[in-house]
Each structure stands twice: as structure tokens, then as C-alpha cells.
Image: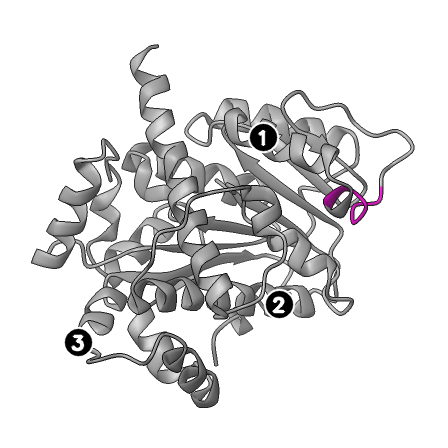
Amino acid sequence: MDKRAVDNSNIIATNNDACQCKLYAIERGYWNDPYLKILAGSIQQERRTPEISLGYYVRVHGVRYLIEKFIKLTNNDCQIINLGCGFDTTVFYLLDNENLRFKHFVDIDFEEITELKSNKIHRLPSLRNKLPMDNKSLKIPCGFHSSLYTILPADLRNTTQLDNQLKLLATNSIIDFTKPTLFLSECVLIYMSNEHSLNLLKYLSQTFSQCCLFLNFEQINMNDRFGEIMFENLKQRSCHLIGMESCQSLNSQCERYKNTNYTSSFCLTLNEYYKKYLNINEKRRIERIDGGLDEKELLEQLFEHYCFSWAYRDENNLGLNKITFE
């Protein structure tokens, strides 16, 4: 096995880690998701601290809130492309909500992930029956295609490969480069070199230049002691955060969007989101699930090291500046 394959396997393993944490939180009642267990299968679940479960809740809740605002702003005339999707179940969440429609949803990841995800959907009626099939369904090796949903294998560090795959969809009238497009990225860019992530961001802003929004959930404030410990813990598992340069501050997060042709950008820590925007009754509910927090210092420390950031190009004046937590 060559070095790149080894590196990929370590990145791919983060999908299993995220699934374990999410499944534990779902079973504890933080939020409802009947699909992740079907996709992830029998993953051994260790007990997680309340801080970890709260962190995943806030991640899911915040991302879904902005997705819903985007869909409503476009009057359902949009497409969503999920970068480094893993076993994420966002497409099924949206399909279950009749008020949240879209033209097409694309999941993209390494082919090792997309092949597993595609095979499970093909094999399991509880997933497959939710996805209306085209009469002329496109055959995608290590992938999946239906009238509303496509799973596409690609290495996001290779924009030429990504471009070829997306052009395949465009040529078959599955996606439209001029249609309002939301890109989702959750803890993806930090596993790339800054050169690769900047190339990816620039490629997307140029290819979908008429109207696109890039939504990112990722680490921040990684230059303090807490960030150093996080970095070393992952390094010991051969999982290297090689994109940390852009995760030093709110400014560094936004600067890369400025350098890759996005018009405007926003960034806030999970602390700010949790304190200012999360409904107080919902906050009380989730804090009680695991017996309450002994003290909030650890939670605040953790939340100060993750953020939501988003940036957009809006040549059509759709009003993407309205996509906020306000």
C-alpha cells in the first residue's frame, strides 16, 4: 500500500469516529435520525461525555438551520453538493420534510466511502425506496444515481478529477452550473494542505460563479494549548491536521474565502452560536439529557475551538447575504 492510500485510510477512519459519536448522541435523544444506524451498521459505541454529544448536536442543528434557509431563499430551486460526505444522512432528513425540496443532492467522498454507501442504499429497501429512480439511471462506478440524489466518488484534492465527475453530471442534465448551489463541508478542509483547499474553493467559486454558497464546519483557534492537545491526540492516531494554517482565527477562516473569489464571508464559534442563537428551551432540554453539566468551562473551551463559516458569490442578486443565524 502506498503512502497516499495510507493517508486516505486515516482520513476515511474519521467517518467511523463521527458515526460513533453521532449514534451515541442519537440514542441518548439529543436529536432524531433513523437513517444513520442503517448506514453505519453495527459500530461499537463507547460512552461519550455530555460535551461531545452537545458538540455534535450543535454541529447538526446549526448546519441544518442554514441549509433550510438556503432552500427557502431559493424557493426550492437549488442543488446541494456535500463534500467529504461520509455516512452523512442530510439527504434523507430533507426528503422526509415536504417543505424542504431541492433539484438535486450530490454526496462526494473517496470511492472507498461512496462504494459502501451506494451498496447499502441499493441493498436496503428502507433507503432505496425513498429515492425515486430515473428511467435512464446513470451508471456511476462506486457510486449511485437516482432522480434526486447522486453519490459521486472523487478525491477533493484533485480538482481535475472532481471537474470531470461534475461535468459528467452536468452533461447528463443532473446538475446545472448556473443554478443556486450550496456546498457543505464538515471537518474536511483541515485534512487537506492549504494549497489543496484553496484550489478546491477557487475551483468551486469559478465553476458555480453565478450563485453559490460554501458552508464549512471546522476547527478554529488551534494555536493555543487546547488546540495543540487536539492536534497531538489526532497525530498519535496518524490523522494529521495539515490544513491548520487556516484554522487559527476567525480572520484566517474568512481570509481564504477572500483569496478564492467569494464576495463575502462570515464566521462564528460554537460558543457564540450556542449562547446567542440556540433556543433557550432546547438548550435546557439537551443539557439535561445526561444529567446536566457539572460545570460549563470544558464545554465552553471545546466550543471555542470549532466554528461555522460560510461564504458566497451572488451574481444573480438572490440575496445570499440573508443567510445568517439571525
In the picture of the structure, the residue carrying the numbered disc 1 is 116
In the picture of the structure, the residue carrying the numbered disc 3 is 297
Q: Mark 1 falls on what kind of element?
A: helix
**C-alpha distance separating marks 2 and 1:** 28 Å
Q: Amino acid at mark 2?
A: Glu
In the picture of the structure, the residue carrying the numbered disc 2 is 68
> Residue 24, position in %: x, y?
43, 58
Q: Residues within 10 Å of mark 1 (few under 14, many from 20)?
A: some
> Residue 235, position in %: x, y?
18, 37
What residue is shown at x 62% (from left), y 31% (from top)? Answer: 152
Q: Is residue 76 highlighted in magenta?
A: no
Q: Mark 3 falls on what kind of element?
A: helix
> Residue 143, position in %: x, y?
65, 28
Q: Amino acid at mark 3?
A: Glu
Report the residue that reaches farthest toward the right.
135
Task: Answer with mark 3 or mark 1, whichever residue precedes in sequence.
Answer: 1
Q: Is residue 311 left or right of residue 71?
A: left
Q: Quadrant of residue 245?
A: top left
Above or below, 82 relative to 108: below
